[in-house]
Amino acid sequence: VSALDLARLRALAAAPIVTAAALDAPAARIGRITRRAGSVVVLARHPEAPTAADVGALTSRLADTALVALGLCVGLAWDDRNAHPFPGRPFTLDELLAAATTLGVTVAGSRHLVGAVRHVLTQAKLLTIDEHDVLRLGPVLAGWSDGDLEVLRRNLDVLPEPGGSTP
Amino acid sequence: MAAPVAAHGGAVVDDPAMLRYVDAVIDAFGQGDIDQGLTRSQILERALRGGGLDRAELEHRIDVFVELAMLLPYHDKAHQQRYVINTDAVAGSLFFRKGLTEGGIEELLQLLGATADAIEAGRHDLGRVAQALVEQRGYVEMWTAAVNRLTDTATLGELIDERSQHDGERMLVQVERLVDVVTRHQPSLRISATSLLSAAQAYLMATQRLLERILDEGAATRDFSLLDPAEYLHLATSGTVEDLASTFEGVVWDPPRPEVLPTAIVTALRSYRPQRSRQRRPPVDTNAAEPPRDPLAGVDARLDAVRRQREHAAELLLQGEAAVELSAHLRAAPWPAALRTIVELAALDGDEHSPYQLHLADSLIVDIDAHTTWTSDAHLRVEHPKVQDPLRAHADEAPR
């Protein structure tokens, strides 16, 4: 069962797994570690596993526009900078557009950001958006390690404040 | 002969690495200048030159070699310290080295072949053949037991190392030949020969089990290094898509998903520069105060200047003559210059007010040594209008 759950988790990126602890050993064998993200479980890289760069693997990357959009979203949702940004606070699309304007993004450029939010980032489960355009960080971000968060904490000046103030 | 592997006068060494010491001693005698043998110190010096040997252990080994007559005193005197090497010991060293690297299978195969040869040549009597058959069946069974032990207990790495030391098919071929020879020359020993054949078949099956286990273990761990290039090629050229895909039937693949690291987000935010469209200023009209100029004004003057320039060039070619052959000039000129000359002259020729005429022949001249390789005969001619002398014209018109 654990092998099946692990395969399901790898296929879906995030899935409700009842006995997540049973996945620890099989996940470790493939260089992963389980992390609970609310009602679902996600797989993160095991701290001792080699990175994609270590093994010379080429991974797909987000376009810069999508990365900028995600960075703004993380800044807006991360209300307690001492804690993990996931799940953070919900925020609206208008807040995101305001933060983008502060960054200097034009009206035309903001359309690309909204497109990245609605399609690329939500499909990758990095963000969720509801019918009222309320945004939340996606469960995949729960896989960020303390080391990853430290990078963000050292560069808080580029992230918008949760209240919407300028970076 | 056993000296190379003797720990001391009465025992064989435990560690095969000890053969390095005998190799070093034999190598010491292989470095030349040994007509009168070598002294003990020379042996030590030469053997230690290669490095990696312990001096105390080497001295101990030399004592053993002397004790077992691998090193023979050049003179049989108690104080004699010069030694030569016993050739039997060198042969023994080679034998043990080969046995260690090839497991002795070659020697067993050789023994089977030599026995068959001896029976065919009539060198072995009935009793000796019977003894050889029993003895060699025992050897084959020993090899079979060794293979079975490996198959049942050895790790994959040990199996891979050992597999080259067993060859069931060659063994069976040699035994079949021996059995055939025995059946023909000593038919009364057919039962013993058959027993030997059964033992060889058991050995073949044992080696096949060993290979099967290697392949099974290799497949389980997806160790493709166990396949040799020929097997890869065979599979790639003859295997179906289903066969090839079956290798990964049990493999779970993660769907392609972007890897998002905070470092990339920070980099993107820091380097993001929104594109801004800037309105272009209209060009500044510096001559706004001056009246507009007619763009066609002066065209005639410019055309006239061009025509005069062309006529001047034509006159240079004519050198005062009324006609000139241009072929030599064209071949001597580099290609762009030759082309320019023809174009200028053709323009003059087409000018109805120009007295110059260019005639290009249909001939084609190829001169690979010339600057311009491909040319045609060209002829330039000028017909200046005749200017009448007014005085002479008046005289002509006067009544005679």
Image (tube, coloured by chain):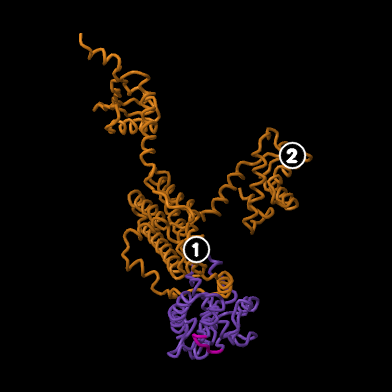
Chain colours: A purple, B orange
* Residue at 45% across, 86% down: A1
Chain hosting mark 1: B
Residue B362, placed above or below residue B140: above
* Residue at 63% across, 84% down: A81
Image-quadrant location for residue B189 = bottom left
Q: Residue furthest right?
A: B79
Q: For mark 2, does the 10 Å Cα neighbourhood hold few (<14), some (14 to 19), or many (20 or more) residues? A: some
For marks 2 and 1, the one nearer the N-term is 2
Residue B274 appears anywhere in the view? yes
* Residue at 46% across, 58% down: B166
Verify whether residue A74 appears in magenta. no
For disc 2, the marked residue is: B39
Name the foreground residue: B247 vs B134: B247
Mark 2 to mark 1: distance in Å? 101 Å
* Residue at 36% across, 19% down: B320
Name the foreground residue: A57 vs B284: B284
**Which amino acid lies under the numbered mark 1 shown in the image of this protein?**
Arg
How many numbered marks appear? 2
**Which amino acid lies under the numbered mark 2 shown in the image of this protein?**
Thr
Range shown magenta: A89-94
Q: Is residue B128 left or right of residue B77?
A: left
Residue B208, placed above or below residue B362: below
Residue B369 appears anywhere in the view? no
Say what secondary structure mark 2 lies in. strand
Tag shown at residue B281: 1
Q: Is residue A68 left or right of residue B234?
A: right
Residue B268, placed above or below residue B196: below
Q: Position of residue A155 (x, y in %)?
A: 63, 76
